[in-house]
Structures are given as C-alpha cells and as structure tokens.
Image (cartoon, rainbow, N blue to C red):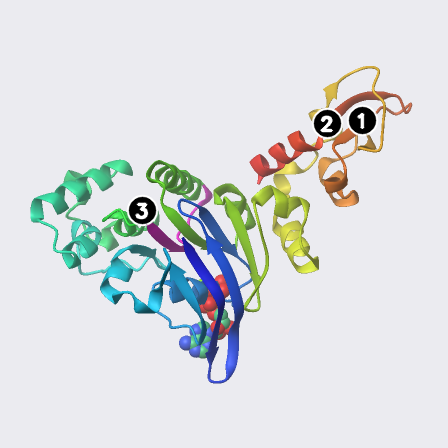
Amino acid sequence: MIEYRNVKKSYGGKQIIKGVDLTVEKGEFVVLIGPSGCGKTTTLKMLNRLIEPSEGSIWINGADHREMDLVKLRTSIGYVIQQIGLFPNMTVEENIAVVPRIMKWEKKKTLDRVKELLNMVNMPYNEYGRKYPKQLSGGQQQRIGVLRALAVNPPVILMDEPFGALDPITREILQSEVKKIQRELKITILFVTHDMQEAMKMADRIVFMDQGRVLQQAPPKEMLLHPANETVARFIALQGIGSRTDRITAADLMQQASGLAAGEDSVTVEAEEEVKEICQKYDLSKYRRICVKDSQGLLIGEITVGSLLEHLTEWM
Ligand SMILES: Nc1ncnc2c1ncn2[C@@H]1O[C@H](COP(=O)(O)OP(=O)(O)OP(=O)(O)O)[C@@H](O)[C@H]1O
Ligand SMILES: [Mg+2]
C-alpha cells in the first residue's frame, strides 16, 4: 500500500538519500534501522511530505502522494516525532486532541476518544487529562506522544525513535503496548530505531539503511541468519546477540536423545560450548540441526536451528 520508488534527497548538491525502493504492506510493522545519520528520519518525513523528495516518487494506495491533498495526507498518517514533541502549553487532553480538532470532530466524540486512549495506557482521564507535559514523567510523555498519533485511528503511523531515552522497563512496556495496538487495529507502522533488539522485537520486516541506501530488508530472523553483508553483520553482532546469552551452553538448550547421527544437515559441537560462540563460528543458515557431543565424543542430544532462533529472538 506504500511504495517508495527510487526516492532520492539532496541538500545543497549533497545526496543524502541515494535511491530508496521500499514497499510496505497494509498492516505491516516495518522497522528502519541503521547508524546515526544514515537517513532514517529523512525517509520517514518524506512520506508525509514534511520533506519533499528531490527525485523519485512515493505511492500510497495507488496514488502519487504529491497529488494528494496535504491536510488529508497528514491526518491519515499519525506521526510520533523523535524527541516526544508534546506542546508544552497544552494539557494532555489538548495534546491528544490536536488532530481530531483539525478534522473538526465534535467535542463529545473527541472527549470520548481521549478518555478511551488514556485508559488504554492506564492513565485515567480524571487524573491526567488536565495535566501539562512537564508534570509527567518521560515515559508518560512518550505514551501521550503515541496516543496523539493514534487519536483519529489513522491507517498509517510513523514513529521516529519513540522510546529513546527511556529506562528499559518502561521501554519494554511501551513496546508491548504499541505492538498490541498495532495488531488489534491492523495499523501500518513505519518505525525508526537504531536499537537492533527493539527492531527484532517489533518488526515484521527490518529495513537496514546505511549512508542513504537500503542495504537489506528481511524479517528479523532472516536478517539474523543471513546478514546481506559485513556492515549488517557487524551491526547485528555488535548489539544483537547480547549479554543475556552469556554462558548459555549447547547443553542448556539441547533435547537429550540417543541413537543420533550427524549428517550433512548438522554441525557437531561440544556440550560446554557457548551458544554465542556457536552462532559466531558456524554459518547456521546452512544447517538444520546442531548435534551435541560429550567430552568423550558421544552424541548426547541435539538442537534444531529453528528452536535456537526462537531463543535468540527471545533473548534479544
Ligand atoms: N535540512 C538538512 N540540510 C542538510 N543536511 C541534512 C538536513 N537534514 C538532514 N541532513 C543530513 O542528512 C543525513 C541524514 O539525516 P537523518 O536525520 O535522516 O538521519 P537519521 O538516520 O535519522 O539519524 P539519527 O539516527 O541520528 O536520528 C545526515 O547526514 C544529516 O546531517
Ligand atoms: Mg533520526
């Protein structure tokens, strides 16, 4: 439903987006990831025309987005900007109601919606509706930023590092909330982060950008297994398979079995070998099973590569 066709952006002769092709299906959760300055925010902002592409085109439901009415375009795309961006002189209620007001919703309908949204994130209207952003914690402010984007049920939402600078627990709660809302309402989300663990958790598909180009797009597990090149591989290795897998060994994960035989579809590792090392040592995309041997070399169990991947994405 959203299609970037060879989109480029230059500033003063310097090309910073170098031809992005990207298709996002309805209801899909797509995460843009990549190092700082690679062009994630610019790619996002070109969709709602906060930035105009220099070349190429963007299509939404079969229409060139430059030919759509700008107000309609903007109100059909919720936007959570990098760094929260609540209006400091407006209450929580007024902040959430910004787009309903632009769309001239009736007062009652708007109020009901504000209450409904606040309930969704356990911030009841009576307690929080009249507060100002500075009276809220950072996590609460980010919740309101997300609610503001949801207010009129837009089919598409752009989220630019919406959970940056949050403590890990609040971050995890908000990630789950957004994922749940997205699934229930089948919203299409384009989400920017530079945190691979967040991408793994949230994405149906990850789009990896570097220096204004898309290097790879793939579902999380596939990117983990088949990074397209060194840059992607290094990014994943550096922050991906993290400290939570320290000291988890093959023996911890294996299913015990007797009468096993190694084959072309398997690698054989020692029971004490750490999972982290196994992932780094072997190209697991080539195998289906990991056979586990004891110190005498006797096969004592196996791990399917599929179940290992399940664990890896859980640990991320
Ligand atoms: N208005 C502008 N004029 C000139 N250069 C710009 C402008 N906006 C962005 N850039 C440059 O374009 C590149 C991409 O910027 P962008 O904000 O899209 O990166 P990003 O991937 O979102 O980075 P971050 O992770 O730090 O938010 C950067 O090198 C930036 O300096
Ligand atoms: Mg950015």
- In the rendered structure, which segment of residues is drawn in magenta? 155-168
The crowd level at tag 1 (other Cα within 10 Å; few <14, some 14-19, many 20+) is many
* Residue 132 vs residue 74, the one in the foreground: 74
Q: Nearer the viewer, mark 1 or mark 3?
A: 1
Q: Which residue is mark 1?
A: 292
Q: Nearer the viewer, mark 2 or mark 3?
A: 2
Residue 256 x, y percent position in the rendering: 75, 17
| Mark 2 touches mark 1? (CB < 8 Å) | yes
* Residue 230 vs residue 24, the one in the foreground: 24
Q: Label 1 amino acid?
A: Val
Q: Label 3 amino acid?
A: Arg
Q: Compute the Cα span from label 2 to label 1.
A: 8 Å
| Mark 2 touches mark 3? (CB < 8 Å) | no
> Which is more N-terminal, label 3 or label 2?
3
Residue 223 x, y percent position in the rendering: 62, 48
Tell me the element at label 2. Answer: strand
* Residue 169 vs residue 27, the one in the foreground: 27
Tell me the element at label 1. Answer: strand
* Residue 38 vs residue 8, the one in the foreground: 8
Q: Is residue 178 magenta?
A: no
| Res. 143 mark | 3
Query: What residue is shown at x 16% (from left), y 56% (from top)?
Result: 103
Q: Is residue 162 magenta?
A: yes
Q: Label 2 amino acid?
A: Ile
Residue lying furthest right: 296
| Res. 303 mark | 2
Query: What residue is shown at x 66% (from left), y 32% (from top)?
Result: 306
Residue 39 x, y percent position in the rendering: 49, 67
The CB of the residue at mark 3 lies under 8 Å from ligand 2: no
Image quadrant where one finds the C terminus: top right
The crowd level at tag 2 (other Cα within 10 Å; few <14, some 14-19, many 20+) is many
How many labels, in total? 3
